[in-house]
Image (tube, helix red, strand yellow):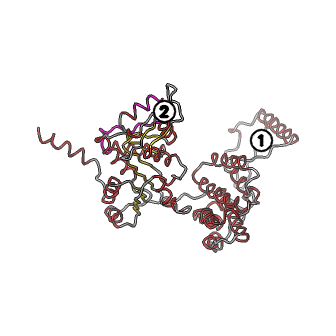
Amino acid sequence: MSEPAAAQPHSRASQVQPLLGYERLAVAGLIREDALCILGSGMGWQRLVAVFARLHHYQKAGALLVVGCLPWQKEVLCAELARHDPQVLPPADISAEVPAMERIELYKSRRCCFVTTRILVVDLLTHRLVPQQVAGLIIMNAHRVTDHSGEAFAVQMLRAGTSCNSLPGPSGAASHTNNGNKGCYVRALSDQPQAFTSGFNKVERVMRALHVRKLHLWPRFQSDVAAAMELTPPEVVEWEQELTEPMLYILAAIAEIVESFIKELKRTNKIDCTFADALIHEGPQPAAASKPEHPRGGATGHSGAGAAGAAQPFTPAVRGLGLLHRAVDESIRRQLEPTWQTVGWRARQIVKDLRTLRTLASYLTAYDAITFLAYLEGLRQSEGTQCVWLFHEAAHTIFNQARRRVYIYRQVPTKKQQQQQQQTKADAKTSAGRKRKPEQDMPSTLPPGTPYVEAVLE
C-alpha cells in the first residue's frame, strides 16, 4: 500500500516538463537582478512567468503584479500555471469592473494579479495600494514601454514613492507621503526582438524607463538555446493556401502604389531604397507571364480555365508581398528621422500611407472578405482627403476587387424587359395548361436519325 502512495507524487511531477537549460539560466538571471529579458519569438515566455508566479505563491512576500498582458496572453499563462502546479491559484484579473474595495483586498491578499497600468497608477496615487505591499512587478510586452508610458510611471512611483500632499484625504486634510519600496523587483520580458530595432537607442530608453541595468538576450542561435532545440527538432508541416483572383489583383494594386511612392520619395528625398529596387525590378516568372501586370477594375480576359493558373501568382502580387514583408515604411522612416522636421508634408504622409498599405496587405489574408471590405470603407471615412494613396489610380482596383469578393453584381432590367419577362411567363403558363398526348401513344421505336417531335393536341 505504501509503494503506490510513494509513486503518486512522482507521477504528478512527471506530467510537468522540466525547464530547458536556457530557461533555467534565464530564470536565474532575472531572480538574481532586475533586468530586461528579450527572447526569440515562440521560445516560451509563459514558462518563465509561470515559474515566477509559482515561486511567489509559496513565498508571499507581497503582491505580484503582472502588467501589460494581452487577453490571449492571460489565458496562455493561466493554462501554463495550472499545468505546472494545480495548487497555485490563477492570477486575479483586476480591471475597471472590479470595485475599489475589492481591489484593496486583493492587494492585501498578496496574490499574483493581472492589472492594467491605468488602474495601477490610480491606485498608487489614491493610496489604495501602498508601495510596501508590492513584492514585485512583471512587465509583459516590454517593447511597448516608452518614457511617457504608464509602465514607466508606475515603476517610478513604486521605487521612489508618491507624494500627494496637495490632494485632500477622506477627512479633508492633506494626504501623507508614501515612501518608495526599494526592494520591489522589476522583471521585464519581450518576445518580439524586431520591435527594438525601430527608433534610436530603443533598448536603452526602455531600460532607463523601467529603472533596470541588466539586459538578457536569448536568440535562437545562442549556444544554450541551439543545444536545447537540437534535442527535439520540430516536425514542420506547411500548408499553402492559394490566393483567389481578386486577392491577387488587390496585392498587385498595392504593389503598384508602393512602387510609385518609393520612386517619388527617391526623387524628392535622398534615401536608399536598394532593397526595394531589387524587388521592383525582379523579372517576371515564366508561369506568370500571361497575367496582366497592372489590372484596372474587373477581371476582364480571365476565363474559368485561368483560375487554375492562380496557383502561380503574377509578378506584381509577388512584388507586393516582398515589398510589404520587408517593412519598407520603417526603413524609410529611419532614414528620414534625422531630418524629419525638414521633410515636406507630402513625404510624411507617404511614409504613413506605406504603413497603412502594409497593414492592408496583412489584413487581406487575415480577415474574411466582409471584414476586409468594412475595414477599407472605414479607412476611406477616417483618412478622407488627408491620405495620398486613396487618390492613386490603383486604389480603384482595391475597392472594386474588395467589393467583388462580397457582392455579385447583376444588371437591373428595364421596364420593357420586365414586361417581356412577364409575357414570357404568361405564355409558359398557357402552354403548360394545354393537354399533351400521352406517352404511350408515341411510337416506341423511331428510325435512326429521325428527330423526336412532340405533338400537341389542341
Q: Which residue is at the far right?
A: 416
Q: Which residues are magenta?
A: 83-105
- Dot 1 corresponds to which residue? 455
Position of 372 with respect to 57 (left or right) is right
Judging depth in this view, the residue of 425 and 93 nearest the camera is 93
Query: Helix, strand, or loop for circle 2?
Result: loop
Q: Which one is nearer the viewer's eye here, 103 or 46?
A: 103
> For the residues carrying marks 1 and 2, which lies nearer the camera in this image?
2
Circle 2 residues within 10 Å: few <14, some 14–19, many ≥20: some
Residue 409 at x, y = what percent?
Answer: 74, 47
> At 41% across and 63% down in the image, what residue appears?
219
Task: Answer yes or no: is residue 309 visible.
Answer: no
221 in relation to 353, above or below? below
First in residue order: circle 1 vs circle 2: 2
Quarter containing the N terminus: top left
Badge number at residue 175: 2
Q: Is residue 451 left or right of residue 3?
A: right
Q: Is residue 93 magenta?
A: yes
Q: Point out residue 455 in the picture as x, y percentages from the top left corner.
A: 77, 41
Within the image, what quadrant is residue 131 found in?
top left
In the depicted structure, whether residue 208 falls above or below residue 61: below
User: Is the residue 180 above or below the residue 329 in the image?
Assistant: above
Please, what is the three-letter code of the amino acid marked with disc 1? Ala
